[in-house]
């Protein structure tokens, strides 16, 4: 069962359970996916693209929660964090920092990357293999660190 089908099932369950916040979040997720399909003119959207959309939604909500906290609006920050919890239910388990480091080292070895010039090749391979399960912002730092170490 694909991710889109899981989301539709979750929407039906939330409707039956009258879980208003969960229903709203699931509908937002489906709308974001549909918007991306319209934008890219690709239907149905591949699973890795859907995971990318959901990852961006999480990032947006984390940023908003931080802004709300600094602005003295904890109730809005809490609402954003509640949405993050629902979105994460549909994402694969994120790799730990140690697992990310090991995966980056493995990809560097597999691609034969030797310098910062090969960073794009390494990041492309990581995105292909670990879509949705790796924070590529953090992985980017690890790639830079490992590629800049003299061998």
Image: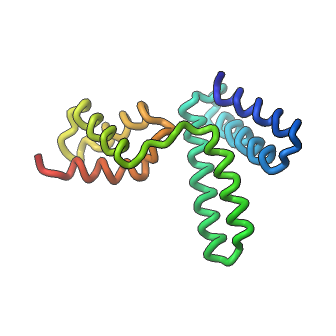
Taking the image as shown, residue 97 lies to the left or right of residue 109, namely: right
31 or 77: nearer the eye? 77
Residue at x 67% of width, y 38% of height? 33
Residue at x 61% of width, y 44% of height? 88
- Where is residue 67, by image quadrant? bottom right
Q: Report the number of numbered marks.
A: 0
Q: Residue 70 placed where, x, y %?
A: 61, 76
Residue at x 34% of width, y 53% of height? 141
Image quadrant in which the N terminus is located = top right
Q: Residue 85 placed where, x, y %?
A: 65, 49
Taking the image as shown, residue 148 lies to the left or right of residue 4, namely: left
Q: Residue 15 placed where, x, y %?
A: 87, 38
- Where is residue 44, by image quadrant? top right
Q: Residue 86 placed where, x, y %?
A: 68, 46
View extreme (left): residue: 151
Q: Is residue 22 above or below residue 110?
A: below
32 or 104: nearer the eye? 104
Q: Is residue 47 above or below residue 18?
A: above
Residue at x 61% of width, y 56% of height? 60
Which scheme is used to colour this image of the protein? rainbow
């Amino acid at each position: 069962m694909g991710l889109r089908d899981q989301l539709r099932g979750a929407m039906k369950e939330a409707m039956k359970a009258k879980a208003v916040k969960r229903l709203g979040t699931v509908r937002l997720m489906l709308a974001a996916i549909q918007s991306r399909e319209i934008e890219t003119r690709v239907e149905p959207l591949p699973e890795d693209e859907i995971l990318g959309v959901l990852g961006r939604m999480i990032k947006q909500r984390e940023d908003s929660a931080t802004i709300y906290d600094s602005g003295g609006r904890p109730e809005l920050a809490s609402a954003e964090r509640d949405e993050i919890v629902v979105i994460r239910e549909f994402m694969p388990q994120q790799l730990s920092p140690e697992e990310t480091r090991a995966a980056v080292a493995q990809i560097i070895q597999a691609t034969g990357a030797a310098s910062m010039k090969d960073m794009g090749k390494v990041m492309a391979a990581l995105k292909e293999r670990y879509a949705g399960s790796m924070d590529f912002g953090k992985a980017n730092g690890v790639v830079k660190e490992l590629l800049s170490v003299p061998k």
